[in-house]
Image: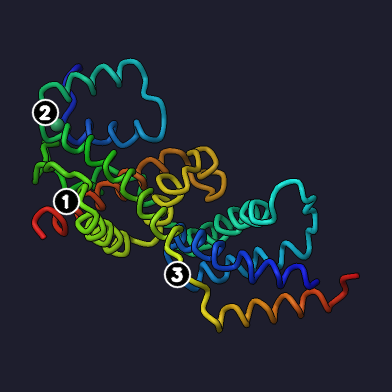
Amino acid sequence: MLMLTCKQASKLVSQSLDRPLSWSERLRLRFHLLICDACNHFNRQLRVLRNAVKRMMQHTEGDSTIQLSLEARDRISREINRSTESGYH
Amino acid sequence: MNNINNWLNEHGDYLYRFALARLRDTHQAEDAVQETMLAAIKNNSFDGESSARTWLTGILKHKIIDLQRKQIREQPISDLIDLDASDTSMDDFFDSTGHWLDKPQTLEIPDNALEQKQFLKALSTCMDKLPAKLATIFSMRDIQEIDNENICKELDITTTNAWVMLYRARMGLRKCLEINWITG
Ligand SMILES: [Zn+2]
């Protein structure tokens, strides 16, 4: 069977991000994408999604206004002191 | 160990942001930093060859995965097994013949800085709406870029389960983005 349904095609599109597709899967997917705009959009969307979440991560990492709260910093500092006092020489 | 408290002062915020970007939860991110500092005391193998920050970040990466594993394992196992029945889990998106109920639309990250910020905010909201375990595995795969084999090992799930969960997570996110961004 050469024809995939959109449901099958979209599953392969997602899995292509997680594993190498087999030769026949690639062929059938490519054929489906030739004739189906919706699945082409879906394919593109998943790649956009991947880029976007990475950009989101970089924004958080680079945002110097995001800091440990004073409470958290104190708590961690206390834990460090407790841990170094108990049995470490 | 004064050293460690100095490290907390110098690198604490950096490590916190690193953890927050991956765990997306302030309490969990704080826990990850604390665990990293305590592990740094216990396993004092810092050789000064890499920077302290690089060394601490290496520990932090493992602590983040530990927290994610815990989060996934606290979910009832039946929920994970349920995912094997993948054929019904996509009924929201496809009709019985496998056609899209709503055809996916064009979706692009805007170039304009302000719009891009709004886009990422919409994405963040969508991730919050995702079931926690799906958000976690999606983060591990698409944000942390851990390979599938290691995700399965860490979470003790099958590769098929992982594929199904990732498929569902991505499907839900792109749909949510369409609603919140394109028409928003
Ligand atoms: Zn299609």
Looking at the rendered structure, the secondary structure element under dot 3 is loop
Q: Is mark 2 within 8 Å of ligand 1?
A: yes
Q: Point out the frontmost of discs 3 and 2.
A: 3
Looking at the rendered structure, the secondary structure element under dot 2 is loop
Q: Position of residue A31 (x, y in %)?
A: 18, 19
Q: Are marks 3 and 2 in contact (CB under 8 Å)?
A: no
Depth check, front residue: B12 or B104: B12
Quarter of the rendering containing residue A74: bottom right
User: Residue sitting at 47 percent across and 63 percent down?
Assistant: B20
| Number of numbered markers | 3
Q: Chain of mark 1?
A: B
Q: Quadrant of the N terminus of chain B?
A: bottom right
Residue located beneath label 2 in the image: A36
Residue B162 visible in the picture? yes
Between disc 3 and disc 2, whose residue precedes? 2
Q: Quadrant of the C terminus of chain B?
A: bottom left
**Is disc 1 on the same chain as disc 2?**
no
Residue located beneath label 1 in the image: B92
Q: Is residue A48 left or right of residue B101?
A: right
Q: Which mark is residue B105?
A: none
Amino acid, disc 1: Asp
Residue B95 visible in the picture? no
Depth check, front residue: B111 or B27: B111
Residue located beneath label 3 in the image: A66
Amino acid, disc 2: Cys
